Amino acid sequence: FQRSEFRGFTPAGGLGANEGPFPVQHLGILRWGYGPASTLKVTAPADGGYELYWKARSDFQGQVVTVTVDGKQIGQASVPGSYTQFADTRIPLSLTAGEHEIELRYAQWHKEPPRPTAVLFQFLQVNRLTPS
């Protein structure tokens, strides 16, 4: 069972456990992406269009996430440096049926203990797009 905020993948590394909810801040479940990268395993049921969607923020101004699929870079996205504002990002994916690995590589992360936090996700999803 996957929470609706985090679905369409199996974490394979660099993604923290569910934290929250945080009702005082009006936030549900959150998950940290850890530096230098988070890895997601995806099983595509059919060839076609998919979308990597996240709503996230970072402690760092100028945070950039580089996205690779099966080792090939497909894009980059900025994540706002803010302690309160989360922003949406949608990255189109073209996947063949079968197993895939998506890596989110972070430009910056906290290098001191206890955790190498880079990006805080409110949503992180891989969704199949409906053919039009």
Image (tube, grey):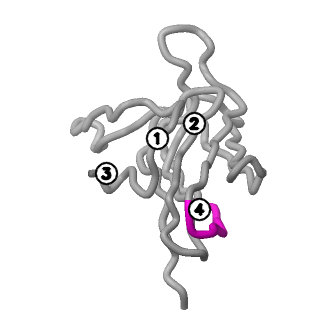
| Label 1 with label 4: CB-CB less than 8 Å | no
Residue depth check, mark 4 versus mark 2: number of the one nearer the observer = 2
Mark 3 sits on what residue? Answer: 2
Label 4: few (<14), some (14–19) or many (≥20) C-alpha neighbours in 10 Å: few
Q: Earlier in the sequence, mark 4 or mark 3?
A: 3
Judge the density around disc 3: few (<14), some (14-19), many (≥20) Cα neighbours within 10 Å.
few
Magenta range? 90-98
Q: Is residue 92 magenta?
A: yes
**In this picture, residue 23 sits left or right of residue 122:** left
Q: Nearer the viewer, mark 1 or mark 4?
A: 1
* Whole-percent x, y for residue 58 in the image: 56, 34
Disc 4: which residue: 90
Disc 4 to disc 3, how far (Cα)? 20 Å
Q: Secondary structure at mark 4?
A: strand
Residue highlighted by disc 1: 11
* Type of amino acid under label 2: Ser
Q: What main secondary structure does the magenta stretch of the protein show? A: strand
Q: Which mark is residue 38?
A: 2
Q: Residue at x 53, y 24 (%)?
A: 117
- The disc labelled 1 sits on which kind of residue? Pro
Q: Quadrant of residue 79?
A: top right
Does the residue at mark 4 contact the one at mark 3 (Cβ under 8 Å)?
no
Left or right placement of residue 15 versus residue 22 in this view: right
Residue at 55 percent across and 20 percent down: it is 116
Residue 17 drawn at (x, y percent): 37, 31
Say which of 127 and 57 sits in front.
Answer: 127
Query: Is 74 located above or below residue 28 in the figure?
Result: below
- Element carrying mark 1: strand
Image side of residue 20 versus residue 63, left or right = left
